[in-house]
Structure formats: structure tokens, C-alpha cells
Amino acid sequence: MNYIIKKENNYLIVSVIGDVDISLTDSLREDVDRALAEYKDVNRLVFDLAEVDFVDSAGLGVILGRYKRVTAKGGKVYLAGAKPQVKKVLDLSGLPHLMEIYSSVDLLLDKIG
């Protein structure tokens, strides 16, 4: 498994390591959805991308799908820590128009905590 999912207050933080590509997306999607179902009090989802080197369209699809699921229940999704090459892909995808992006999880939690 190339990710860690943890609950912190009313946040679900998904820290991914390595590439977010088709080889990872099925398990990532299932595990995030399972955690969202388990932690019913969570209304904010954070994708910690600090250790991500590459995101493909399947990875973007997982992020967008969780965005739709969380925002349908009145929650918010955040992206944090994206390296320049990953941020460029995020920018090209248009996801920053839907989600707030922060340079780190710590900064995000300090700001909106």
C-alpha cells in the first residue's frame, strides 16, 4: 500500500507516496470510500501529495470522484503539498478551481483548523 489514511478531528487525511496512477487507483478509491463511510463525522477530506511524484488521469479521477462524494454531503476537499510537477498537472486538470490548494498539510490545518 502506497498511502496512509488517518482521521484527525473532522478531517480525513490521505497521504500518498509515489505515483498516483492506474496501478493504485482502485485500492485508493475503495479505501478512501470505506473510511468516509466509517467516519461519518468527517466532512473534510485532505489529499496530502507531498510525497507524490506523478499523477495520471486515473489518479485525477479518484480525487475528483471523492470531491463529488464529499461535497454532495456539504463537505470540502483540499489538496496539500504538491510538488511543482504534480501541481502543474493539477492546474491543467482544473482541480484548483474546485478545491483549495495548500503548500503543506500543516499550513492547511493551521489556516482552516
Image (cartoon, grey):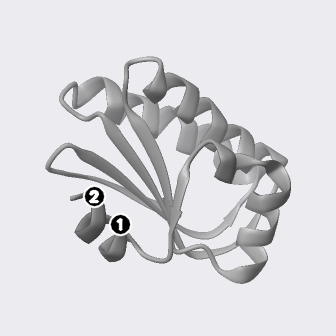
Does the image show residue 27? Answer: yes
Q: Position of residue 78 (x, y in %)?
A: 47, 52
Image-quadrant location for residue 75 = top left
Going 47% across and 26% down the picture, which residue do you hit? Answer: 71
Of all residues, the one furthest to the left in this rendering is 9
Q: Position of residue 43 (x, y in %)?
A: 29, 34
* Image position of 73 (left or right of 103): left
* Amino acid type, residue under disc 1 in the picture: Leu
Q: Is residue 108 above or below residue 6?
A: below
**Classed neighbour count for the residue bearing mark 2: other residues with Cα under 10 Å, few (<14), some (14–19), many (≥20):** few
Q: Which residue is mark 1?
A: 108
* Image position of 105 (left or right of 102): left
Q: Is residue 79 above or below residue 25?
A: below
Res 16 label? none
Q: Which residue is mark 2?
A: 112
Q: Nearer the viewer, residue 2 or 106?
A: 106
Q: CA distance from mark 2 to mark 1?
A: 6 Å
Q: SS of the residue at dot 1?
A: helix
Does the image show residue 1? Answer: no
* Image position of 51 (left or right of 31): right
* Amino acid type, residue under disc 2 in the picture: Ile
**Classed neighbour count for the residue bearing mark 1: other residues with Cα under 10 Å, few (<14), some (14–19), many (≥20):** some
Q: Position of residue 66 (x, y in %)?
A: 54, 33
Going 47% across and 18% down the picture, which residue do you hit? Answer: 72
Going 34% across and 41% down the picture, which residue do you hit? Answer: 44
Of all residues, the one furthest to the top in this rendering is 72
Tag 2 near tag 1, CB within 8 Å: yes
